């Protein structure tokens, strides 16, 4: 069938299999172009199908020739109905990995559940023996705690006061004012339960209990800090509390891995267009201004550039991993440069519907958004019939 983008608000309801495959191939070629990474050889990526998780799996496999197991929760295709983009990404990744002679298997299911943890542990035990790197890159708005059965829902809200600032509808380019009411009740606790470090620690505990972590194994989770213009709703809001918990959990995990000489890190990454960030008020406007500046400075990065640099220049240099005063890896260093942030702040004050196309990079934002779903990629014939029924090779 001919597959076109079908939008509902900030969500694309369709995905293009050939476009997703092209996107994965582009990322693979980028990693290969940057040279070999002396990294981990057996890697588990939890949240492996899109964004930073997918980039981590690609960087491990095609930078370090690593065997990878990817865990994700994606919608398979039905006749006449496309899969979610992460499904097509994973199918393309496995196809390219197997073509390159690399081990790659995937598990599709709820990574928060005990059942998927069990399935993953059994696969590692059977095929790899142990893993020496665990990437934790889950981005879900809902989590059911497998031990209590309680379902928690995260919220993106400020704490204490209503937040009011500019935002943009990236489809129309209309800049407007948005207000977000402060959190109430159990909002903070629920957001921490979903997006904090509890599940990360449960994964590491489960792996360690069955001796599936190799000596010196490391684990990395991803976080974000961001600028002052977004901090009331992000870093100082409910999600910020969850990120604080995630970062505190890294120290607890490191303590638990001391006997195998392992360590847990949180990598603070750059603001990028993702399905999640597109739905967060304020963020699309910030990113469109940030992109304009970073591209002009020659320091713009997407997910794959970020993770390739994280691997090659931070995690796997052979020396001490550089961290900030709170123990975090800062791969958002270019975004948070004083000169970059000063320019963003200046443009933020000026931004209107009329001038955003000129002072920001709204087209770049839109293109990245469509790319997430396999659309608007060079080299893909979108007028050709596409087979939506693509399967992930290791998932029957």
Image (cartoon, rainbow, N blue to C red):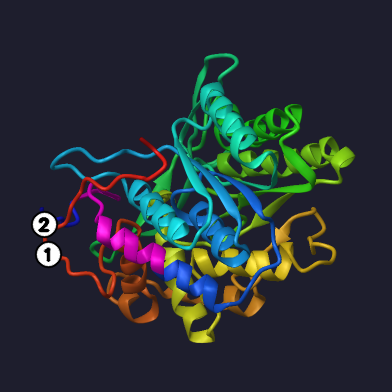
Badge 1 marks a residue whose secondary structure is: loop
- Residue 255 on image: x %, y %: 85, 38
- Residue 142 on image: x %, y %: 46, 31
Quadrant in the rendering for residue 126? top right
Callout 1: 10 Å neighbours few (<14), some, many (20+)?
A: few
Task: Magenta stretch: give its range.
Answer: 7-25
Name which residue lies at 46% across and 65% down: 286
Callout 2: 10 Å neighbours few (<14), some, many (20+)?
A: few
Tally of marks: 2
Q: Residue furthest right?
A: 259
* Residue 2 disc label: 2
> Is disc 2 in contact with disc 1, using a CB cutoff of under 8 Å?
yes
Q: Which residue is mark 1?
A: 384
* Left or right: 94 as drawn, with respect to 214: left
- Residue 265 on image: x %, y %: 73, 50
The answer to whether residue 208 is visible is yes
| First in sequence: mark 2 vs mark 1 | 2
The answer to whether residue 169 is visible is no
Badge 2 marks a residue whose secondary structure is: loop
Residue 13 colored in magenta in the image: yes
Observer-nearest of 177 and 65: 65
Name which residue lies at 35% across and 58% down: 372
Instruction: Compute the Cα span from label 2 to label 1.
Output: 6 Å
Name which residue lies at 55% across and 32% down: 194
């Amino acid at each position: 069938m001919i597959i076109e983008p079908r939008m509902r608000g900030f969500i694309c309801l369709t995905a293009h299999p050939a476009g997703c495959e092209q996107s994965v191939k582009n990322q693979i070629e980028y990693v290969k172009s940057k040279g070999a990474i002396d990294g981990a050889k057996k890697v588990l990526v939890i949240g492996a199908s899109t964004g930073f998780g997918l980039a981590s799996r690609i960087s491990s496999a095609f930078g370090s020739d690593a065997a990878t197991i990817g865990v994700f929760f994606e919608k398979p295709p039905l006749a006449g109905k496309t899969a979610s983009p992460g499904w097509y990404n994973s199918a393309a990744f496995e196809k390219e990995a197997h073509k390159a002679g690399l081990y790659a298997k995937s598990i599709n299911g709820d990574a928060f559940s005990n059942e998927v943890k069990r399935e993953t542990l059994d696969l590692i035990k059977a095929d790899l023996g142990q893993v020496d790197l665990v990437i934790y890159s889950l981005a879900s708005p809902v989590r059911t705690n497998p031990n209590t059965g309680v379902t928690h829902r995260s919220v993106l809200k400020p704490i204490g006061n209503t937040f009011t600032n500019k935002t943009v509808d990236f489809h129309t380019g209309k800049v407007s004012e948005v207000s977000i009411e402060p959190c109430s009740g159990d909002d903070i606790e629920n957001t921490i339960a979903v997006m904090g470090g509890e599940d990360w620690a449960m994964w590491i505990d489960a792996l360690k209990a069955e001796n599936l972590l190799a000596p010196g194994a490391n684990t990395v989770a991803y976080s974000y800090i961001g600028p002052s213009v977004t901090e009331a709703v992000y870093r100082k809001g409910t999600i910020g509390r969850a990120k604080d918990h995630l970062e505190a959990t890294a120290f607890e995990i490191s303590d638990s891995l001391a006997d195998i000489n392992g360590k847990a890190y949180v990598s603070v990454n750059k603001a990028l267009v993702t399905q999640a960030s597109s739905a967060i008020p304020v963020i699309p406007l910030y990113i469109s201004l940030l992109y304009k500046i970073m591209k002009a400075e020659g320091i713009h990065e997407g997910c794959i550039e970020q993770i390739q640099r994280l691997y090659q220049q931070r995690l796997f240099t052979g020396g001490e991993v550089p961290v900030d005063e709170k123990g975090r890896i800062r791969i958002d260093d270019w975004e948070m440069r004083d000169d970059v942030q000063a320019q963003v702040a200046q443009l933020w004050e000026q931004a209107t519907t009329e001038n955003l196309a000129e002072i920001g990079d709204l087209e770049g934002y839109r293109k990245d958004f469509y790319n997430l779903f396999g659309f608007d990629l060079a080299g893909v014939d979108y007028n050709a019939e596409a087979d939506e029924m693509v399967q992930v090779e290791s998932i029957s």
